[in-house]
Image: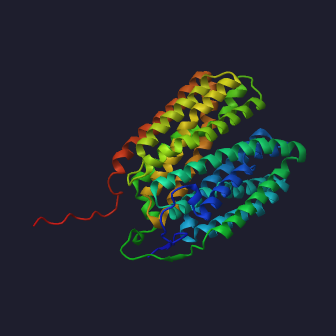
């Protein structure tokens, strides 16, 4: 019999009706998301740091690949740990590990040490994602309110990314690249303190006989066709979204635009998120407020992401790229809220962290695919082919997502059906 994790809170007061009434733990999770992303300098500035140490482009690429492997492993590991060890324990442990590891990596010079540091940094870099997803599902049981929380959470991620680019460039210019890793470490330590203070202790407890916990969380995940279709659809859609910060620099450099021009596209992205999140959130909250997962929204959002970022392949000015990035934001907002809604509604309570971790690994995979796809397209057919392949990735995500509409309206593969009562 497997062990599961108690929800962060077992109090069933009337469901919170809006942001002012959300539990303090929810606000703490949103702040942790903002701080972890806003001071998450390790990944975007790692290549600059290694170049500053004198490493070749090939060595830098290898270190980034190791970081990406760590990112992928970290999503699965922290998702599993969130179910087995508890949300708070996992989040605190991951953030403290980052606080210790990042300064050490900043001082490393030998390539083996750099790669070891990059692997550990990759594991903890996005570790809050599956833990926060599972914790929000524990704390907010109302589908509409949970969608609203996830909407603001996505806004925090994007605002944090804008802070990372702007503050990182200024700090690196004044203090050097190693200082960025120290700031990142301090932010992770602050996140650990927030989690330790505001999240309840959610120690594992024995599973209740006769529930889905009679199968291990891993068995539930492996046998759930819906999860793997969602995973494939998300990789395709997120390949478009990841292009905002992986493929876009390649496209802009190919058009002779500077790094400053790329910075303006990120400002346009953050501004569009800030403006559109409060406008879309009420509508998305109503769409998510029900027992059925929002698979239709996932399909539409994948097409919007493909069309928006596909437009970047046709741009050749800073304004054109900024418009393309802003045009993709509605699809990005809808996608993340819809995907989180689906993950929460298809996951058994004892496997919420694992399901969130498996789904969270899609971004790590997309970050690897997007620049490779963009580089190959630019080499083979120029901007037009890059636009076409991005549009095709969005269409592929929508096509894979279509079967989910039917599958999410019946029990998961392997879930026992309750026979109908015999007619009298």
Residue 56 position in % (x across, y down):
80, 40
Tell whether 303 sits left or right of 172: left
Q: Residue furthest left?
A: 424
Q: Is residue 54 visible?
A: no
Among the 4 quarters of the image, the one containing residue 188:
bottom right
Residue drawn at the location 37% of the way across and 51% of the way down: 408
Q: Can residue 122 be seen in this view?
A: yes
Where 141 falls versus 307 (above or below)?
A: below
Tell whether 389 sits left or right of 249: left
Camera-side residue: 73 or 78? 78
Where 98 falls versus 255 (above or below)?
A: below
Residue drawn at the location 53% of the way across and 57% of the way down: 356
Q: Quadrant of the N terminus?
A: bottom left
Among the 4 quarters of the image, the one containing residue 94:
bottom right
Residue drawn at the location 57% of the way across and 60% of the way down: 22
Residue 164 position in % (x across, y down):
74, 45
Where 191 falls versus 321 (above or below)?
A: below
Residue drawn at the location 44% of the way across and 42% of the way down: 297
Q: Quadrant of the C terminus?
A: bottom left
């Amino acid at each position: 019999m497997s062990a599961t994790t108690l929800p962060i809170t077992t109090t069933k007061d009337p469901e919170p009706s809006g942001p002012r009434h959300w539990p303090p733990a929810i606000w703490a999770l949103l702040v942790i998301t903002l701080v972890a992303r806003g001071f998450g300098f390790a990944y975007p500035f790692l290549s600059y740091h290694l170049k500053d140490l004198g490493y070749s482009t090939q060595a830098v690429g290898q270190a980034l690949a190791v970081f990406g492997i760590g990112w992928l492993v970290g999503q699965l590991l922290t998702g599993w740990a969130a179910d087995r060890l508890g949300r708070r324990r996992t989040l605190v442990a991951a953030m403290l590990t980052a606080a210790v590891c990042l300064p050490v990596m900043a001082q490393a010079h030998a390539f083996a040490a750099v790669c070891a540091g990059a692997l550990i940094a990759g594991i903890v870099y996005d570790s809050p994602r599956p833990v926060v997803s599972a914790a929000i599902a524990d704390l907010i049981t109302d589908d509409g309110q949970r969608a609203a929380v996830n909407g603001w959470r996505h806004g925090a991620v994007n605002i944090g990314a804008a802070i990372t680019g702007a503050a990182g460039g200024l700090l690196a210019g004044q203090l050097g690249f190693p200082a960025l890793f120290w700031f990142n470490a301090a932010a992770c330590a602050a996140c650990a303190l927030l989690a330790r203070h505001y999240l309840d202790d959610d120690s594992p407890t024995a599973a209740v006989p006769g529930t889905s916990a009679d199968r291990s969380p891993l068995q539930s995940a492996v046998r759930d066709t819906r999860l793997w279709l969602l995973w494939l659809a998300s990789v395709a859609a997120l390949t478009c979204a990841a292009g905002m910060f992986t493929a876009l620099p390649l496209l802009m450099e190919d058009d002779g635009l500077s790094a400053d021009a790329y910075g303006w596209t990120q400002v346009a992205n953050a501004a569009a998120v800030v403006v559109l999140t409060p406008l879309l959130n009420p509508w998305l909250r109503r769409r998510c407020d029900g027992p059925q997962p929002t698979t239709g929204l996932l399909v539409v959002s994948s097409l919007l992401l493909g069309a928006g970022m596909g437009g970047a392949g046709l741009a050749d000015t800073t304004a054109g790229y900024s418009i393309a990035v802003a045009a993709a934001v509605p699809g990005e907002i809808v996608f993340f809220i819809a995907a989180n809604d689906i993950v929460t509604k298809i996951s058994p309570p004892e496997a919420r962290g694992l399901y969130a971790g498996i789904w969270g690994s899609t971004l790590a995979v997309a970050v690897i695919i997007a620049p490779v796809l963009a580089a190959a397209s630019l080499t083979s057919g120029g901007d037009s082919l890059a636009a076409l392949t991005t549009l095709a990735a969005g269409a592929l995500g929508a096509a894979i997502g279509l079967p989910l509409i039917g599958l999410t309206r019946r029990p998961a593969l392997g879930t026992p059906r309750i026979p109908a009562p015999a007619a009298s």
